Amino acid sequence: MKIGIVGSGHIGGLIGTLWARAGHEVLFSSRNPASLESLVRAAGGDARSGTPDEAIAFGDAVLLSIPFGALPEFGRTKAEALRGKVVLETGNPNHKRDGAMAEAVTRSVVCPLKSGPP
């Protein structure tokens, strides 16, 4: 399977590496693809690097591993390019990075293992 990775940091880099080692074609992306050379080498197999737009065009499936706060704008600008693809998303709200958006999401979540909001 061809998989595009948008966000090749800790999570995207690890999952993409595991997929490449399992035999999938993986395109890791960054706004600066040259910075991904060591990740691509470590992943081996059919891994390569490119831009986020190239990763979206390449993948039958696309893994989004970008900051939670960037998701709304990313969705607005990339919706057409992602149409018809399997999209997986790894984001989680982080109060330090995502501010008020993360606080609102955290307040809205009810954990089934607890009684009431977190």
Image (tube, helix red, strand yellow):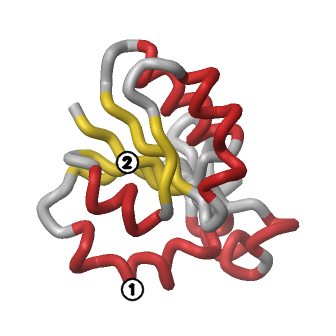
Rate crowding at label 2 as few (under 14), some (14 to 19) or many (20 or more) other CA atoms within 10 Å: many
Q: Which residue is mark 1?
A: 77
Q: What SS does tag 2 mark?
A: strand
Inspect the image, locate mark 1, and give the three-letter code of the amino acid beneath it.
Answer: Thr
Q: Which residue is mark 2?
A: 4
State whether residue 41 is above or below residue 88: above
Q: Could you tell whether 13 is left or right of 54 in the image?
A: right
The CA span between labels 2 and 1 is 17 Å
Q: What SS does tag 1 mark?
A: helix
Please say if the residues under marks 2 and 1 sit with CB atoms less than 8 Å apart: no
The residue that appears at 21% across and 31% down in the rendered structure is: 1
Q: Could you tell whether 108 is left or right of 93 in the image?
A: left
Of pointers 2 and 1, the one earlier in the residue sequence: 2
Residue 93 x/y as whole percent: 67, 61
* Near-viewer residue (14 or 54): 54
State whether residue 113 is above or below residue 41: below
The residue that appears at 47% across and 64% down in the rendered structure is: 52
Residue 100 x/y as whole percent: 75, 81
The residue that appears at 17% across and 69% down in the rendered structure is: 83
Q: Kindly report which numbered mark, 2 or 1, lies closer to the viewer in this rendering.
A: 2
- The outermost residue toward the left is 84
Q: Could you tell whether 72 is left or right of 10 in the image?
A: left
* Near-viewer residue (113 or 46): 46
Residue 57 x/y as whole percent: 27, 61
Q: Quadrant of residue 67?
A: bottom right
Q: Could you tell whether 14 is left or right of 94 in the image?
A: left
Residue 95 x/y as whole percent: 81, 66
* Near-viewer residue (54 or 92): 54
Rate crowding at label 1 as few (under 14), some (14 to 19) or many (20 or more) other CA atoms within 10 Å: few
The residue that appears at 57% across and 68% down in the rendered structure is: 108
Inspect the image, locate mark 2, and give the three-letter code of the amino acid beneath it.
Answer: Gly
Q: How many marks?
A: 2
